[in-house]
Image (tube, rainbow, N blue to C red):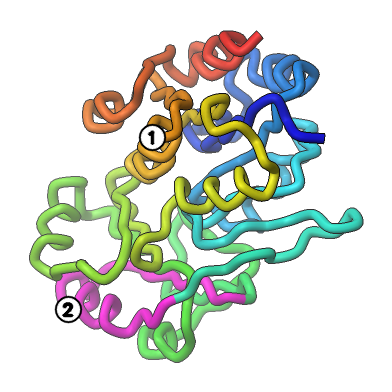
């Protein structure tokens, strides 16, 4: 059955609070929107291993999940999740550039299989389905993403590093102040949602997406270009708020629930 519309939701800072609990009212609001005929799905920067439990917590039955900032699309087939589409790139040039500018940072790559290789663990970032390797091993196979974690650097530092390194062959997003996420060129949440929307034959002008980070800018522009809606959370930085068509409340105040109920 063709859905009434497609709803694509970021997780961190949109659905979940910092302590991994749901934003106020979000569970009920998601259930109400689904009951009204909308396909509600996740579109996150998280890898699948960190996403599946959120999908289950929300009680979602969507066929697709967008992970790794659009580089991975999961699809449920006969009750089993499959890596339906995975975009990869050769990370060597990126790693060489960033390694020379941020030698003290921790690095992680996600392989096409979903396995993650990382150089070091920190409290805020501890991959489960992964193994620790030396920096040189990170670039031995194509990857769907490169993540750089450097707590001693802030957002402005990362912006300077990106400019100095000349990262023009990849897509990247600066997340919380110590996180840089790099995807294949031209890949973001919007490109992945476009594929899903076409598969579902969902009307483009009935799309709603919601998020709070720079990695949501791609899906904002995609939704707006098709006549749909893009909602920024109240705590989002100015760049993200300005790119959205609408602004809702902060995540701790139940902003997503308020936005979702405008569909009813």
Position of the C terminus by quadrant: top right
In the picture, measured across the screen, residue 172 lies left or right of residue 55, that is left
Mark nearest the camera among 2 and 1 is 1
Sequence-wise, which precedes: disc 2 or disc 1? 2
Q: Position of residue 175 (x, y in %)?
A: 34, 46
In the picture, measured across the screen, residue 28 lies left or right of residue 151, that is right
Q: Quadrant of residue 35?
A: top right
In the picture, measured across the screen, residue 197 lies left or right of residue 231, that is right
Instruction: Write the residue at 84% across / 58% down.
Output: 77
Q: Position of residue 13 (x, y in %)?
A: 47, 31
Does the magenta segment cover residue 90?
yes
Circle on res. 75? none
Neighbours of disc 2 within 10 Å: few (<14), some (14-19), many (20+): few
Q: Which residues are magenta?
A: 89-112
Instruction: Write the residue at 52% across / 52% down.
Output: 192
Q: Quadrant of residue 40?
A: top right
Q: Which residue is mark 1?
A: 225
Instruction: Write the residue at 57% across / 61% down.
Output: 72
Q: Which residue is mark 2?
A: 100
**Distance in Å between CA atoms under marks 2 and 1:** 38 Å
Does the magenta segment cover residue 235?
no
């Amino acid at each position: 059955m063709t859905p009434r519309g497609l709803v694509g939701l970021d997780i961190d800072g949109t659905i979940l609070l910092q302590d991994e609990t749901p934003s106020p009212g979000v569970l009920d609001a998601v259930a109400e929107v689904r009951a009204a005929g909308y396909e509600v799905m996740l579109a996150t920067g998280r890898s699948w291993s960190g996403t599946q439990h959120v999908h289950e917590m929300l009680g979602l039955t969507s066929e697709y999940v967008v992970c790794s900032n659009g580089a991975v699309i999961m699809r449920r087939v006969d009750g089993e999740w499959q890596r339906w589409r995975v975009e990869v790139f050769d990370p060597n040039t990126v790693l060489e550039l960033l390694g020379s500018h941020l030698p003290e940072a921790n690095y992680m790559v996600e392989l096409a299989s979903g396995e993650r290789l990382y150089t070091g663990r920190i409290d805020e970032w501890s991959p489960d389905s992964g193994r620790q390797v030396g920096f040189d091993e990170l670039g031995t196979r194509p990857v769907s993403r490169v993540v750089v974690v450097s707590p001693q650097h802030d957002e402005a530092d990362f912006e300077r590093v990106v400019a100095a390194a000349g990262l023009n062959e990849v897509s990247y997003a600066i997340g919380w102040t110590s996180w840089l996420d790099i995807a294949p060129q031209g890949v973001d949440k919007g490109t992945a949602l476009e594929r899903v929307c076409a598969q579902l034959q969902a009307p483009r002008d009935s799309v709603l997406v919601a998020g709070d980070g720079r990695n949501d800018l791609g899906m904002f522009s995609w939704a707006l270009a098709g006549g749909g809606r893009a909602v920024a959370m109240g705590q989002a930085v100015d760049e993200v708020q300005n790119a959205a068509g609408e602004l809702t409340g902060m995540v701790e105040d139940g902003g997503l629930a308020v936005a979702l109920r405008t569909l009813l």
